[in-house]
Amino acid sequence: MPKLQSECPRLSTHILIVDDDHRLLHAMKSRLSQLGYHCVAFNNVTEAAAHLVVATVDLVITDLKMSGIDGAGFIRLVRSQKHVPIIVVTGQPQSAHLEFNTYDGLQIIHKPFSLDALVDGVRLAVARRESAMEESIDH
């Protein structure tokens, strides 16, 4: 049975992943790469921010609490430069990310989470982005 279009990643989907937990970062990148997404991963916000400026990015996955510039600052930076979906993976309580509840295209996934839950979130974000892009072309 053929897969639905929303289940098949487009090879041009570029995902930027940021988390200071090396094992989780590797697991997320490996799983999404196995599914055909083009992933670039960084364990700190400084390098991720530099990459964001020069690269095509269709989706950002970031932890909220990291050393140095935290995920909240990175989310604000992403939104100031690009309008892309953001998935926040966090072990922080809901009160720690209330300011982002109004951000369009932002999902929160609480740690611990399964990689399947992350994949579902990525597929949803990509499908919404593609739908929004098609709507803008039609109008």
Image (spheres, rainbow, N blue to C red):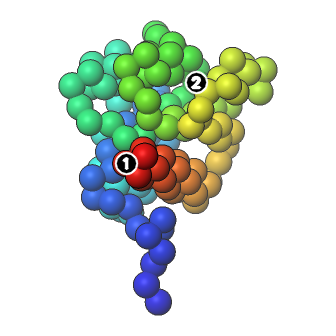
Residue 93: where, in percent of width, then height? 76, 26
Q: Residue at x 54, y 29 (%)?
A: 63
Disc 2 marks which amino acid? Leu
Residue, disc 1: 137
Residue, disc 2: 64
In the displayed structure image, the side of residue 116 where residue 81 appears, left or right:
left
Q: CA distance from mark 1 to mark 2?
A: 33 Å
Name the secondary structure under disc 1.
helix
The disc label shown at residue 24, or none = none
Q: Residue at x 73, y 21 (%)?
A: 98
Q: Nearer the viewer, residue 129 or 24?
A: 129
Q: Decide: marks 1, 2 in contact (CB < 8 A)?
A: no
The crowding category of the residue bearing disc 1, from other C-alpha atoms within 10 Å (few below 14, some 14 to 19, many at least 20), is: few
Q: Earlier in the sequence, mark 1 or mark 2?
A: 2
Disc 1 marks which amino acid? Ile
Q: Residue at x 77, y 27 (%)?
A: 94
Residue 65: where, in percent of width, then height? 58, 20
User: In the rendered view, would you say 31 is above or below 39?
Assistant: below
Residue 51: where, in percent of width, then height? 26, 25
Q: Nearer the viewer, residue 49 or 131?
A: 131
Q: Is residue 110 visible?
A: yes
Residue 34: quarter of image: bottom left
Residue 111: quarter of image: top right
Q: Nearer the viewer, residue 63 or 73?
A: 73
Name the secondary structure under disc 2.
loop
Q: Is residue 21 visible?
A: no
